[in-house]
Image (cartoon, rainbow, N blue to C red):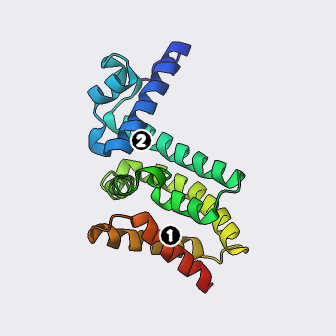
Amino acid sequence: MAAPKQTEKGERRRALLVAAAAELLAEGGFEAIRHRAVAERAGVPLAATTYYFSSLDELVGAGLDRLAREELADARACLDVRDDPHEIVLDLLLGPRSRAEGLDAVLRRFERLIGSGRRPFLAGLLRDQRVEFDALLDEALTRVTGRRPAPGEVRRVTALVDGVVLTALIEAEPDPRGIARAALREAVAAV
């Protein structure tokens, strides 16, 4: 089916649907994104979801892209106002919502990351986002350490934080961000 010609009203509706999908994804993971739920959240007719998106997968991809762009923009904004670079690294790795929402936000983010692996249609999008993510993480780590990270260092920091957070989640620790903060500070101090 050919994509519908976009009018100003159509572009607004499509943007509302993408925003709703991103919100639902952040709040409830992939299972929360259903045609009806997205349409209700967006305040548009149910048929709009299939008019503007050829499949639920396309809508999920658009929602994930928007959510990731919002999270990257939040982290960039924090870097611009010289927020604590350790916290920006944690925002990038655990999501900025983890500052205020704690454990629930970290769980939702890790569920979303793991769930992405079961959705091969997201692989290209995630690879493209990874380039932007790693560049911003490189900048944040430069501020933390006072030097550019060595090749592979960004990925090692990511693996370290992911590993300690996953262990904290398995062990039902109430503050995985705090555990990640301590591990990050220890790793940076050892450099």
* Vertical relation: 121 (above or below) 166: above
Residue drawn at the location 66% of the way across and 74% of the way down = 149
Q: Which part of the image, by quadrant, shows the C terminus?
A: bottom right
Picture coordinates of residue 91, whole percent (x, y): 52, 57
The three-letter amino acid code for the residue at tag 1 is Arg
For residue 61, the mark is: 2
Picture coordinates of residue 185, whole percent (x, y): 56, 76
Q: Secondary structure at mark 2?
A: helix
Q: Is residue 171 left or right of residue 184?
A: left
- Estimate how packed mark 2 is, as few (under 14), some (14 to 19) or many (20 or more) residues with alpha carbons within 10 Å: many
Residue drawn at the location 49% of the way across and 61% of the way down = 93
Q: Nearer the viewer, residue 85 or 47?
A: 85
Residue drawn at the location 41% of the way across and 24% of the way down = 52
Q: Are marks 1 and 2 in contact (CB under 8 Å)?
A: no
The three-letter amino acid code for the residue at tag 2 is Gly
Q: Is residue 163 left or right of residue 184?
A: left
Q: How many numbered dots are placed on residues in this image? A: 2
Residue assigned mark 1:
181
User: Which numbered mark, 1 or 2, is in the foreground of this view?
Assistant: 1
* Vertical relation: 140 (above or below) 104: below
Q: Secondary structure at mark 1?
A: helix
N-terminal-most mark, 1 or 2 = 2
For residue 3, the mark is: none
Q: Is residue 116 left or right of residue 100?
A: left
Extreme bottom residue here? 190
Picture coordinates of residue 30, whole percent (x, y): 31, 44
Give residue 24's quadrant in the image: top left
Give residue 172's quadrant in the image: bottom left
Q: Which part of the image, by quadrant, shows the N terminus?
A: top left
Picture coordinates of residue 64, whole percent (x, y): 43, 43
Cα distance, mark 1 to mark 2?
A: 30 Å
Residue drawn at the location 49% of the way across and 76% of the way down = 183
